[in-house]
Image (cartoon, grey):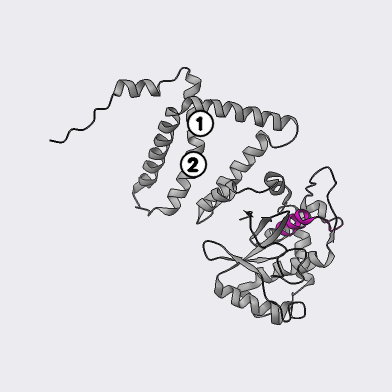
Amino acid sequence: MMKFPKIDFPRLKSKLQVKSPWDRIIIMLLSLLITIPIFIILHQNLIDLEWAFNLDRVFIFIFVFAAVFFLLMLLRTIIILCIAIYLLVLFYGSVIGNYGFSEISEDYNSMIYTMSDNPYPQDIVVAKLLPFPNKSKIISAIEYQNPKVRNFAIMATSKHFKKIKGYSDYRTIIQCFAVFKEINSRWNYVNDPKDGDYIATASESLEYFSGDCDDHSILMAAAIRSIGGTPRLIHTKGHIYPEILIGSSLDLEKVNYLIKNVLFPRESYGKKLHYHIDERGQVWMNLDYTATYPGGPFMYEEILGALTLN
């Protein structure tokens, strides 16, 4: 007869006991913060059983919360120590005006908001974990809701390709290409100060259309997103450049024809388009400041990090 190992419940209970009620409260709050993004991922990927009052989703949330809480309680000494160190780092960042409490709150809220409206929320978490220089500053600088940025983008769509007819399914992409044409035709590359990176906001770059690669990428991403496009920023060795989501390989064929025969025939004559295909088969086209047409040559091929703006 098979014997099952006995569970020492008193010992297990003693492991879950905490020295202070504040420890339990801290662990509960941390568990809740971890549970929310995990639940969103499960909610989007698991079949909806269509139970009354969404009880299946309620049970999933409770189960995930309980599992996370149990694991954190087992590691509570290490967790509490890490939290204390992290809070000190955030306090120091807040004092010197770097990455602090307000920035991490904005990042978390932005991540949850984006995940809740994305069919692949796990990609958002992965993107957050990828290394990207000055990520929080760049996200803050992409002021796609700033009226100046949107008005500029609207001006560009009125100035370029407004009379192009017959491509209603690609209207947004055509308008984003108009933004690309306007920015790249005016951009003046200027280095940052010697003592460090200077991150200009999108509205700031509109004053003189000058700056380095990250300033260009910020302005391009903000203007494109302000009119409904989906941009992302690519980090390579010593360089950052913007890309735009084209769609599927079928969309790429249509956009390839548009660029070479309708929108940028002179600039792209005899040249190929440069783009990346992500893990879901989505096509992202290069919009670097060095390109004279969408899909121009890459300065650097290798991708070290990607920052997608949904």
* Above or below for 68 versus 110: above
Instruction: Please provide the residue range marked out in magenta.
Output: 208-222
In the foreground, 121 or 5: 5
Instruction: Say what secondary structure mark 2 lies in.
Output: helix
Q: Is residue 231 above or below residue 166?
A: above
> Does 93 sit left or right of 83 as displayed?
right
Dot 1 or dot 2: first in sequence order is 1
Check disc 2 and give the amino acid type. Ile
Question: In which image quadrant can residue 61 be found?
Answer: top left
Q: Which residue is mark 1?
A: 29
User: Are circles 1 and 2 on residues that touch, CB within 8 Å?
Assistant: no
Image x and y of residue 67, in percent: 40, 36
Q: Nearer the viewer, residue 102 or 215?
A: 215
Picture coordinates of residue 40, whole percent (x, y):
47, 47
Image position, residue 11 (x, y; %): 33, 21
Q: Is residue 206 above or below residue 93?
A: below
Residue 165 magenta: no
Q: CA distance from mark 1 to mark 2?
A: 11 Å
In this view, the residue in front, 264 or 49, is 264
Is disc 2 surrounded by few (<14), some (14 to 19) or many (20+) residues within 10 Å? some
Q: Is residue 219 magenta?
A: yes
Q: Identify residue for label 2.
A: 36
List the single residue furthest toward the left: 1
283 relative position to 236: left or right: left
Residue extending furthest toward the top: 19
